[in-house]
Image (spheres, rainbow, N blue to C red):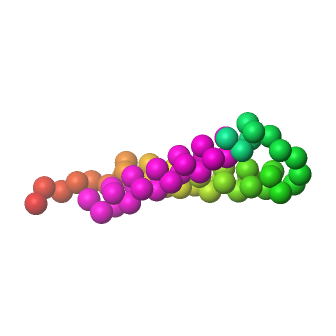
Amino acid sequence: MEKRILGIILSLLGVVGLIYAGMSFMNGGEGTRNIKAIIFSGVIGAIFFFAGIGLIRNTKDKAT
């Protein structure tokens, strides 16, 4: 059950990171600093999201 909860938390953090990257991309802005922030938050968000989904899918619940 702990792995499933961790997976949910990671998935939510990933969604937040991806939404932040999308909002930053849509708002525009110029300069390499903004592009680096968009890429960084998008990659970290994707890693967290897919790691969380993987934990949720691969965790088997045992009846105790």
Residue positioned 80% across, 52% down in the render: 34
Q: Give above or below for 18 relative to 33.
A: above
Q: Is residue 14 left or right of residue 8?
A: right
The N terminus, quarter of image: bottom left
The percent position of residue 28, horizontal first and vertical second, equals 80, 40
Nearest to the observer: residue 4 or residue 60: 4
Whether residue 47 is visible, yes or no, is: yes
Residue at the limit of the structure toward the right, as seen here: 31
Magenta highlight on residue 19: yes
Q: Give above or below for 53 relative to 2.
A: above
Q: Is residue 9 left or right of residue 63?
A: right
| Main SS category, magenta section | helix
Give the magenta part as a residue range.
1-22
The C terminus, quarter of image: bottom left
Numbered-mark total: 0
The percent position of residue 44, horizontal first and vertical second, equals 62, 56
The percent position of residue 3, horizontal first and vertical second, equals 34, 61
Nearest to the observer: residue 29 or residue 1: 29
Residue positioned 71% across, 56% down in the render: 40
Residue positioned 37% across, 48% down in the render: 57
Residue at the limit of the structure toward the bottom, as seen here: 2
Q: Give above or below for 59 relative to 30.
A: below
Q: Is residue 13 left or right of residue 46?
A: left
Residue at the limit of the structure toward the top, as seen here: 26
Residue positioned 18% across, 56% down in the render: 62
Magenta highlight on residue 24: no
Whether residue 54 is visible, yes or no, is: no
Nearest to the observer: residue 11 or residue 32: 32
